[in-house]
Image (cartoon, coloured by chain):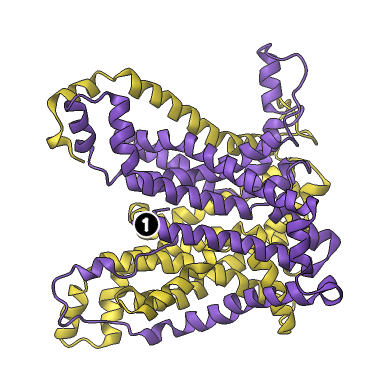
Chain colours: A purple, B yellow
Amino acid sequence: MNRERVGPEAAATPRKSWRYRLANMSWAIPALVFLLVFFVAPLIGNIVRSTTEGAAVTSGASIYYQKLLFDSYYSGVLLQTFKVSLITTIACLVIGYPISYFMVRYAGRWNTLIVFCLIAPLLTSIIMRTFGWNVIFARRGLMNVWLMGAGLISRPLDTLNQPIAVYVGLVHVLVPFMVLSITSVLQGIDIGLEESARVLGASRLRAFLSVTLPLSVDGIATGCILVFVLTNGSFLTMLLLGGGKVTTLALLIYQQFSVTQDIGFAAAMGNVLLVFALLCLALQARFVRRGGIKT
Amino acid sequence: MKNDAMPAALVKRRAKRDPAALGLGIYVVLFMTFLLLPIIAVVVVSFSASTFISFPIQEFSLRWYERIFEYKPFMNSLLVSLQIAVASAFFGVLMGVPAALAVARSHSAWAAAVANVLLAPISIPAIVLGFSLLYFLSALAFGISFLSLLITHTVVAIPYIGRTALAVYRAFPPDHEEAAAILGASRWQTLRHVTLPMIRPGIFAGALFAFLISLDNLPVSFFFGTANTNTLPVVMLSYMQNQFDPSIAAMSAVQMLIAVAMLLVVDAVYGIERIMTAV
């Protein structure tokens, strides 16, 4: 989503002797200064804050980090965060890949409609989407009314405030990013390669598994990392659909800020979340060679 | 895209609609229902007459739309949100586009580093960004003000605009600009008459994205909540935690309408096809 290629494509252009350059580097100064002051500096400030505020003064600078890593409750939250992000990522991949495949191979004129359905949720607020699942999963919500009307259940199901509601909400918000990531890579794969495998006697499944799937691994990686990072940072879905059953790091930061007001601890949690995000980005830079996806 | 190179047998098989494609097609329809269902559900509920959410809906009314126009915090925060969204997109363009032009065609390590800084705010969890900026800006005596909120949203807007501007600018060869320069155009003339018209879809797309993201940016705005700086999502969240009536649905529908209207305006001005290809 955010990695742009800086360089390699230009190395291949033939005329290198004289290239007109409209802008010089000084044009970047306003944005650069703005971001150094209001983006980089605050993040550094946050690192300082996590080691100099509250309990860090009396019990040692790393006290909050020790608490996060070694206190069984907080290490449980870290693990939970990882688990939720992993499950959401896998769910988005499994649900989204066939959609991408259909869009590229079969959709034809329906493609526009599918793209519209993928983009439309972006025009609605995340509160609206979460509220929508509330409406569907509530005791007297759509799902229970339908299921009871169809005679499939006799008593309303308690879906709301269960982990499953959180996962459905997360997948709903994030699966378009996965589909768009994979589609942009699948589009670049020559259909002739799969056809050749078929002509040479491979079954449909075999042709897909050993030709198309490996070629689309860049899109899969981009999409997975994107969804993983975005899930790590989500708290609204857990807050409104989880009923306190799914506590992740981002939700804990929200709670620390709005309830406990332990600023140093919230800062430390933010930094751990930041390290997660940076690790994912490093992974992306390492493994995904073919640059940015289209969203 | 490779129709003419496609084996004839394949074309025939496709025409016959093989079962795999059909199965996949049914799955895609289910998937689209999944994507749209919660949105449709909210719109339906917003027209309900009852004070709680219950299906099937007995009676329809517009009372919740009246309610949101009467409830001051909703309207005030909507105004704040719109101002912030427009202003942050504007300042994002003002800083992001020149920076994108500066680094797009340079191959130095410097340019690569600047491009990374330019795009980095997207990759940082928004909640961390909001939290850090709150304390940073408070220490700088900006406090919790409209300006603080604007600065924070501009930090988020820059990468969205920079990203699309970079992508579109890189897709053009430098030939047009070279030609203009050879023919004696000044840097400013080249920028105004050649470069900007070329990359305008990218700028529009980026600004539209930044606007939409800002309008819905709860994790960043949440930290700057006071009576004067509450944005719509922040007010909606706190309302939702206390009450569960359909006015949230009505407000959501209005917000969606604003986003759609925005999209239509951009479409009328510039054409959605060109915007979408830029994104």
Count of numbered marks: 1
Q: Nearer the viewer, residue A195 or B147?
A: A195
Q: Identify the image quadrant of residue B10.
A: top left
Residue A12 is situated, as x and y percent measured from the top left of the image, at 19, 67
Q: Residue at x 15, y 23 (%)?
A: B9
Would residue B183 appear left or right of A48 to someone viewing this image?
left
Q: Residue at x 43, y 53 (%)?
A: A295
**Mark 1 surroundings within 10 Å by alpha-carbon count, few (fewer than 14), some (14 through 19), many (20 or more):** many
Residue B12 is situated, as x and y percent measured from the top left of the image, at 18, 21
Q: Nearer the viewer, residue A265 or B231?
A: A265
Residue A158 is situated, as x and y percent measured from the top left of the image, at 76, 28
Q: Nearer the viewer, residue B36 or A158?
A: A158
- The residue pinned by badge 1 equals B275
Q: Which chain letter matches label 1?
A: B
Q: Identify the image quadrant of residue A105.
A: top left
Vertical relation: B9 (above or below) A184: above
Vertical relation: B161 (above or below) A140: below
Quadrant in which the N terminus of chain A is drawn? bottom left
Q: Residue at x 77, y 54 (%)?
A: A74
Q: Is residue A168 visible?
A: yes
Q: Residue at x 14, y 85 (%)?
A: B183
Residue B95 is situated, as x and y percent measured from the top left of the image, at 47, 78
Q: Amino acid at mark 1?
A: Ile
Numbered disc 1: secondary structure: helix
Q: Is residue B144 visible?
A: no
Would residue B47 appear left or right of A104 to someone viewing this image?
right
Q: Identify the image quadrant of residue B177.
A: bottom left
Would residue B119 appear left or right of B12 to someone viewing this image?
right
